[in-house]
Amino acid sequence: QVQLVESGGGLVQTGGSLRLSCAASGRTFSSYHMGWFRQAPGKEREFVAFISRSGQSIYYTDSVKGRFTISRDNAKMTVDLQMNSLKPEDTAVYYCASTPGSNCYNMDYRGWNYWGQGTQVTVSS
């Protein structure tokens, strides 16, 4: 089992940057794929970024490509999301998630097994 704790959210102006971090517990972190999702008020949770257990495969939703960067450090058991050029439409609660490495890449949040508590990101216009 994996427990996840996000940090790094906050309030930022349009065009600004934030770095989210997710700290994991458990001895098998390196065997899990990791992802970031977000949920805006009144909307369904949506996929943001994926990184495979080895870090070799990375995917982003189209709206954040070129602005967000996902990375992981298996030794420190952390996964980060660097967010640049933030826009008001990026405002949401951001969640870190994990799924066993035996699973395929999946953009559907319902296919992920473990979740953090979420961290609020607010981008003001």
Image: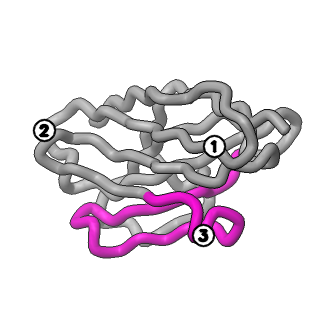
Which range is magenta?
45-69
What residue sits right under mark 3 in the picture? Answer: 65
Q: Is residue 24 left or right of residue 65?
A: left
Q: Name the amino acid, label 1.
A: Gly
Residue sitting at x 59%, y 38%: 94
| Residue 13 in which image quadrant | top right
Which numbered disc flags the more N-terminal residue, 3 or 2? 2
Q: Secondary structure at mark 2?
A: loop
Name the residue at 28% across, 34% down: 24
- Tag 3 or tag 1, which sits nearer the N-term? 1
Residue 33 lies, in percent from the top left, at 34, 58
Q: Give the CA separation, mark 3 to mark 2.
A: 31 Å
Cα gap from disc 1 to disc 2, whole angstroms? 35 Å
Category of crowding for the residue at label 3, using alpha-carbon neighbours closer than 10 angstroms: few (below 14), some (14–19), many (at least 20): few
| Disc 1 residue crowd, few under 14, some 14–19, many 20+, Cα 10 Å | some
Q: Which numbered circle lies on residue 61?
A: none
Residue that numbered label 2 is attached to: 27
Quadrant housing the C terminus? top right
Q: Label 3, secondary structure: give it.
A: loop
- The image shows residue 55 at horizontal and vertical percentages of 27, 66
Residue annotated with mark 1: 16
Q: Are marks 3 and 2 in contact (CB under 8 Å)?
A: no
User: Residue 70: where, in percent of width, then height?
Assistant: 42, 57
- Cβ atoms under marks 1 and 3 closer than 8 Å: no
Instruction: Indicate which label's residue lies in the foreground, 1 or 2.
Output: 1
Q: How many labels, in total?
A: 3
Q: Is residue 52 left or right of residue 84?
A: left
Q: Amino acid at mark 3?
A: Lys
Magenta-span inclusion, residue 52: yes
Magenta stretch: residue 110 in it? Answer: no
The percent position of residue 28, horizontal first and vertical second, equals: 16, 45
Residue type beneath disc 2: Arg
